Image (cartoon, helix red, strand yellow):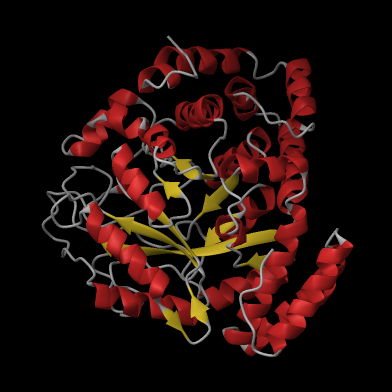
Amino acid sequence: MYNSKSKIATEFIDHQEILATLEYAKQNKNNLPLIETILEKAATLKGLTYKEAIVLLECDSEEIMQKIFHLAETIKKKFYGNRIVLFAPLYLSNYCVNGCRYCPYHAKNKTIPRKQLTQEEIVKEVIALQDMGHKRLALETGEDPENCPLEYVLKSIKTIYSIKHKNGAIRRVNVNIAATTVENYRKLKEAGIGTYILFQETYHKETYEYLHPTGPKHNYAYHTEAMDRAMEGGIDDVGIGVLFGLNLYKYDFVGLLMHAQHLEDTNGVGPHTISVPRIRPADDVDVKDYSNAIPDEIFKKIVAILRIAVPYTGIIVSTRESEKTRADVIRYGVSQVSGGSKTSVGGYADSKEEHTEQFEVSDNRSLDDIVGWLLEQGYIPSFCTACYREGRTGDRFMRLVKTGQIANVCQANALMTLKEYAEDYASEHTAELAHKRIEEEIHNIPNPKVKEIVIENLHSLDDGKRDFRF
């Protein structure tokens, strides 16, 4: 039986409740008075329930869809302004004992070379990323207790934070590794991670178990309950997501929002981020096996409705998506994107290192190209990591977002980190665009005192000083 406050996976993600919710949405897909009421509620910026959100997703009225897009764009601007946070994945190892049918790292794949970065190789990778201008990383590994134990990940985090190259430094390390124990989550927290990220892949238990036939990941409950253990271990910023294309998207959409509601109800704070990757071609994986792949229009609709359903949560889209698709979903909800990404182990220091990649990248532009593109589109590319470093995490972060006070620091930090990028890494064209945007956006900082300090700090950046933050 469905219970959002339960710590049992099959109760807070209840199959029968999802089926009943999907049936309810079908019956009300043309119920315009209900849909208008839902949109009115969403406009109050308080979010939506999974049942309300799926009614909007089920609706196929073009007029309603345009209202949803407009509202999503309005809500995104309200909470995130025109800031887009940039990050890069860093693959440490592709050793894996799981049998995931959709991932080339699966244990039975004998064609892909296995590799684990040494600490010396990690230094080279991080320097390459710093030379691009990155300040925020997401660590990625396969699951292998022998070839990639937690101790290795912890040591790697320590190495990454220790590397200071020219004006470069990685200031926030997010971690996307397999579900683990409360004790291990405590160790990750002590290591200074930002967000702990774990994709559910699919919330449909039977499909999940089929897609993960062997290995520790086969255990649906242990995987689905991971975020509760992470929060028990002291990690208050967690990121959830599904891999769209593995299962029917409406089912996983409901499951995703159920999971977000569960975290809010049981831990007092919902997910810090939601990721929405779609299945991509990869070694030893045939995407034709996944007939549930969703088209761009549906994908855009999903992102827009997620934005209005969970207005305070960051939405992430990676370089899995094309430039055009990313442009669309950034407009309607996405607040974080990767740039200049490599999905291979060692791919930043060695550009030829592609035979260990996890999946094909659609957006192959350099970080500088993406920063310039965002500026041309009217956005502020942000390399900010201040909230994590100032202790504004979990419920403290959410309170600031919900009251709108976060704008006082976000706009300021975005502009100062953009100035750093322009001075240290940008091409001449991108630097020119960045300086112009900074001059325009300074006046939009709401707090006069903050604005005054930002102007002083921007001048100090001209003099070679770095790492100012609120």
Q: Residue 229: percent from the left, percent from the top?
A: 37, 34
Left or right, 371 with respect to 176, comes to: right
184, above or below 92, in the image: above
Quarter placement of the C terminus = bottom right
- Residue at the (74%, 62%) spot, across then down: 411
Q: Residue furthest top?
A: 1
Left or right, 399 with respect to 233, comes to: right
Q: Residue 337: percent from the left, percent from the top?
A: 55, 59
Q: Residue 297: percent from the left, percent from the top?
A: 59, 43
- Residue at the (50%, 80%) spot, across then down: 168
185, above or below 323, in the image: above
Which is nearer the eye, 165 or 377?
165
Please identify the quarter of the rendering in which residue 427 is found: bottom right
Is residue 179 in view from this perspective? no
Quarter placement of the N terminus = top left
Is residue 141 in view from this perspective? yes
162, above or below 284, in the image: below
User: Tag count in the figure?
Assistant: 0
Please identify the quarter of the rendering in which residue 465 is found: bottom right
Q: Residue 40: percent from the left, percent from the top?
A: 80, 26
Left or right, 434 with respect to 189, comes to: right
290, above or below 331, in the image: above
- Residue at the (24%, 38%) spot, across then down: 217
Which is nearer the eye, 154 or 432?
154
- Residue at the (61%, 56%) spot, across then down: 387
